[in-house]
Image (cartoon, helix red, strand yellow):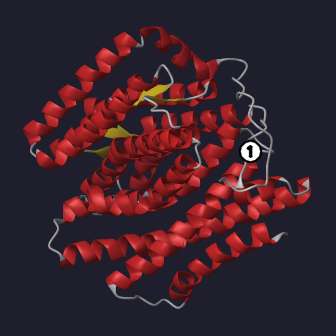
Amino acid sequence: MSAKLVRPLGLCAGLTVPALVLRAGGLTPAPVAGLLLFGMAVVAASFVLAWAAEAAQVDISGGLAIAILAVIAVLPEYAVDLYFAYTAGSDPAYVAYAAANMTGSNRLLLGLGWSVVVLVALALAKRRSGRTLRELTLGSRYRVELGFLAIASVAAFLIPATGGIPLVLGFALLGFFVFYLWKLARAEPGAPHLVGPAATIGALPKRVRRLLVTVLFAFAALVIVLCAEPFAHSLLETGTSLGVDEFLLVQWLAPLASEAPEFVVAILFAVRGRGDEAIGTLISSKVNQWTLLVGSLPLAYLAGGGGTALRLDARQIEEFLLTATQTLLGVAALLALRFPRWGAWLLLALFGAQFVFPGQTARYVLCGIYAALAVAALIRNRRHILPALAAPFRAEPEHAEPRQRVSPSWPT
């Protein structure tokens, strides 16, 4: 392999060594040191994950590559949330933690992740072209993912409506996730425009490329799984020492740590001028959260000794309702496959409002605002509703738009 590939991969691998040594030796560093070392490893693994996902698009559909990337990137969050749900089977107090972690990470992904990625992509586009762009445009191939998210977001309202997550809903959501992966796998691989290490990998002989991509996916997943939990614990311990409330730590700081790989990957795509793929990654992650993650919670609860439904209290129902209405607004705003700059600022402002007004009444008011804006967006984009809902069930998947050929050069 050329130095263009060995150097960046070697650097990323080297940055993970201190954290892996700590994990192998069972050592627990001071909170601040753990935050630095484990966080450095997670970020390095995120770079490797992004390169592998980009190069994989030479052999598999871009949508499936992005879905695999999204699943690996959110593994830390799943591990934490499923642990809470499993423990809740014997200790009901953990039900609140499972709901808090899931809803917090979900709202963080859309309110902060989608907004920041769009704003970064538009700002860098202005630097490259000298023109001010008012919106980020997504290719038609993302209508399938958006359709899956639209259906999942509607199904999400069953949770606050019934006051829990029954086992039958869990199985239905897991089945929907399997259908989602099957649908993406049927799409033909395109000719992606690759740069940097991803381009070098993409130019390798077929057998070597596929083997290397598989190894990189496995390595990134291993590092993220091993290092994300101690990274989250270090963050929580640092927050506790500063007197931060435990529920807020579980709902916001822990998800912020577990979502770090995903945010890094999405921002990398945005920085490279691939804002549509950045948003595509985050859309895929939202689909994962509302299907794979939510569907797994009642199974983990049952395995831990609980019943056939994960029951929620009034506070958790409010959190799920707020999360569902926020998701509905995000889907409604994207139906036309255009993400305007003002829409990103609006989602970011509404996300920040929940910290300024944290009470029960404020949560219901925010639910009303999200719902009203979603209805307005649905009316405005009404001609795109049926195409989005029908996209997952079309006999022939939509193909990616033609893109530039693989080029091993670095971006300038």
Q: Residue at x 47, y 14 (%)?
A: 385
Q: Would you identify the image quadrant in which residue 247 lies? A: bottom left
Q: Residue at x 31, y 50 (%)?
A: 104
Q: Would you identify the image quadrant in which residue 289 lies? A: top left
Left or right of 359? Residue 120 is right
Q: Is residue 74 visible?
A: no
Q: Is residue 98 visible?
A: yes
Residue extending farthest to the top is: 383
Quick one: label 1, few (<14), some, or many (20+) residues within 10 Å? many
Q: Quadrant of the N terminus?
A: bottom right
Q: Residue at x 67, y 53 (%)?
A: 411
Give coordinates of residue 344: x percent, y percent: 36, 35
Q: Residue at x 74, y 41 (%)?
A: 192
Q: In this view of the protein, which residue sits in the foreground, 114 or 107?
A: 114
Q: In this view of the protein, which residue sits in the foreground, 399 or 402?
A: 402
Q: How many marks?
A: 1
Give coordinates of residue 303: x percent, y percent: 44, 57
Residue extending farthest to the front is: 130
Give coordinates of residue 37: x percent, y percent: 46, 80
Amino acid type of the residue tagged 1 in the rendering: Gln
Give coordinates of residue 11: x percent, y percent: 64, 76
Left or right of 166? Residue 4 is right
| SS for dot 1 | loop
Q: In this view of the protein, which residue sits in the foreground, 295 or 375?
A: 375
Left or right of 241? Residue 35 is right
Q: In this view of the protein, which residue sits in the foreground, 264 or 147?
A: 264
User: Badge 1 is on which residue?
Assistant: 57
